[in-house]
Image (tube, helix red, strand yellow):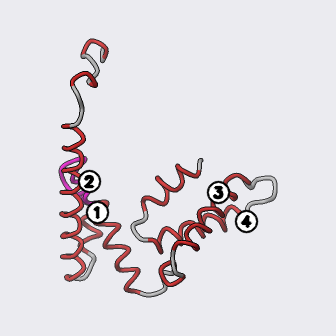
Amino acid sequence: MTKYEYSTFVLGTFPTVASKYRKLSEDLQAEKKKGLFKRDNAICKYLKQIKSEYENRYESSELSMDDELQEKDYWIHKLAKQGAVELLSVGKVSVDTMSKVSCLDNVSFVECVKQTTKLSSYLNNTVQQAEKAVLPEDIVPEELMR
């Protein structure tokens, strides 16, 4: 795995700086716990680089996820992002995601639905703009698709 791949597709699934930092720290610890011959030094190197970048860019209070409010915000953002992606890709929120959202308290439930709606609208508009930007000469001819 490359640094770009890890930063984009692993850390990208975590909605807050604190949750990304926690995941990064856990992965670095797991890699360090591997035996000397099983450890991937390249992975350790870029995990340390990313961790250092976070520590230089953010205050320590932004990197910690020690209280219930941060944990609640994490889940609201995570479920909102998951729901928005599902809305865009399959047209509805999955049973699993909706089941998790329904476990939130009423205020958090409403906030999650609002965030899901805003994010799905944003993603949908961005996709539509990208589709409109495609030029006719960029489209692969149908005979090449066979």
- Residue 107: where, in percent of width, then height? 21, 83
Instruction: Work out whether residue 29 or residue 136 is closer to the camera in this orientation and state it.
Output: 136
Per the rendering, the mark at residue 129 is none
Which numbered disc, 4 or 1, marks the residue that appears first in the sequence? 4
Asked whether the residues under the numbered discs 2 and 1 touch, taking CB atoms below 8 Å apart as contact, a structural biologist would say yes
Nearer the observer, disc 4 or disc 3?
Answer: 3
Residue receiving disc 4: 33
* Dot 2 alpha-carbon crowd within 10 angstroms: few under 14, some 14 to 19, many 20 or more: some
Q: Is 74 on the left or on the right of 108, as rendered?
A: right
Q: Is residue 49 shown in magenta?
A: no
Tell me the CA gap for discs 4 and 3: 16 Å
Q: Which residue is mark 2?
A: 86
- Tell me residue 132's x, y (percent): 18, 37
Which residues are the magenta region? 83-96
Looking at the image, tell me whether mark 4 or mark 3 is earlier in sequence order.
4
Residue occupying the point 39% across, 67% down: 15
**Residue 80 coordinates in the image, percent (x, y):** 28, 66
Q: Residues within 10 Å of mark 3 (few under 14, many from 20)?
A: some
Residue 64 % position (x, y): 51, 81
Q: Looking at the picture, does residue 37 appear above or below residue 108?
A: above
Disc 1 marks which amino acid? Thr
- Cα distance between the residues tagged 1 and 3: 32 Å
Reading the image, the residue beneath label 1 is: 97
Q: Which residue is mark 3?
A: 46
Viewer-proximal residue among 105 and 45:
45
Badge 4: residue crowd in 10 Å (few <14, some 14–19, many ≥20)? few
Would you say the residues marked 4 and 1 are in contact, meaning their CB atoms lie under 8 Å apart?
Answer: no
